[in-house]
Amino acid sequence: MPNDLHIALGLTGAGWHPAAWREPDVRPRELLTARWWLEHVRAAQAGFLDLVTLDDALALQSSDPDRPDDRVDAVRGRLDAMLLAAFLAPLTAGIGIAPVVTTTHTEPFHVSTQLATLDFASRGRAGWLATASPSRWEALHAGRRELPSGEALLAEGAEHVEVVRRLWDSWEDGAEIRDADRHRFVDRSKLHHIHFEGRRFGVRGPSITPRPPQGQPLILATQEGLGADLVLRDLVVFIDRSDAEAAERRARLDAWHPFDARVFTGTPSALADRVAELGTVRLLPAAIPHDLRAITRELVPELQRRGLFRRAYEPGTLRERFGLDRPANRFAA
């Protein structure tokens, strides 16, 4: 079985098209319930997808980073991705779970402990989709007066990611010895101050959470420059039995709310061709559950028939699924 084809699924609200909530099978009253998210993560799990990302932001959605979006005819409001991931982790198996967390308005210490905890809860299936946030409205919500832009914003994000990695390493493997006879729960020599001093962050450490099962949970991004393990290519998908049906559905939703994104519109077979070319991709269902169902029940079987995609999850961590070794601890002797 080839292991170079990886499919992530991006979940957000009713789907990535802003008018998706109007579709008859969406059930918009359930969008802020745990049931909605668990149902669709388990659907992705049934399709043996590599991982799901849980979308998040610190402001209401807007296509313009300098202005709020005051439209009321699209889904507004969301659940916190990190807390949602913690809920989903013990109720799922096999599939990776990667919340979206910004590097621009969060503290690395908190992010590191939250993701380490998620890795423990999921038994090595945690990921992090790191993003740098250019939105002035998010900055105002976070109380930040000055916001870097361009390369400076990415450099700050890369520094944030580096601090998180060092905090994960601040506990060596086996630091918890739990020796009641010698009255020692931890081996203090295996806990380390990271003494990080950068342009934006100054963090001493060590973390309050032991080293995660993966050593370092898988770090993902959708843009270069953040120091991630893997950069995903995004593709919004409208999938139907024919090109004409998919195009008609997209046109109907676009009439309600114009949508500008990289979009695939077509059949499962044609999408299988595209996915095979991309190799590693994050599919963003335009409307949920329609396009999610098409991904798991039509696209995946087509890829399986071609011998390109798994029929079961292999044992191991999320890092191992992507062919990544467990990182050596930088502080270990």
Image (spheres, grey):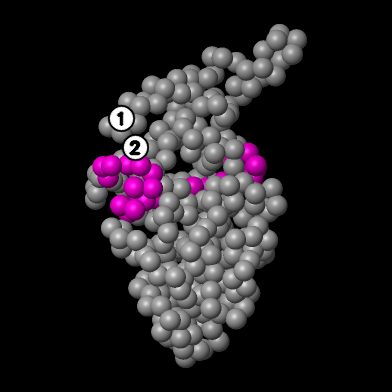
Q: Residue furthest bottom?
A: 244
Question: Within the magenta stretch, is there residue 240?
Answer: no
Q: Where does the magenta region start and end?
A: 119-147
Please, is residue 172 above or below residue 309 in the view?
above
Q: Amino acid at mark 2?
A: Glu
Q: Evaluate whether residue 301 shows in this view.
A: no
Q: How many marks?
A: 2
Provide residue 46's location: percent of width, then percent of height.
Answer: 67, 64
| Residue located farthest toward the right when viewing the structure as drawn | 181
Residue pointed to by mark 1: 198
In the structure shown, which secondary structural element does the residue marked by tag 2 occupy? Answer: helix
Residue linked to disc 2: 159
Residue 66: image quadrant is bottom left
Q: From mark 1 to mark 2, how far is it between C-alphas? A: 7 Å
Q: In the rendered image of this protein, does residue 116 appear above or below residue 249?
A: above
Q: What residue is drawn where x is 54% and y is 47%?
A: 82
Judged left or right of residue 290, residue 179 is: right
**Residue name at image x 65 percent, y 42 percent:** 121
Q: Is 223 on the left or on the right of 319, as rendered?
A: left
- Of the 4 image quadrants, the one containing the N terminus is bottom right
Q: Relative to 192, is 139 above or below?
A: below
> Residues at badges 1 and 2 in contact (C-beta under 8 Å)?
yes
User: Which element is circle 1 on?
Assistant: loop
Please tell me which residue lies in front, 69 or 161.
Answer: 69
Q: Few, some or many C-alpha atoms within 10 Å of disc 1 (few <14, some 14-19, many ≥20)?
A: few
Relative image position of residue 298 (x, y in whole percent) = 60, 77
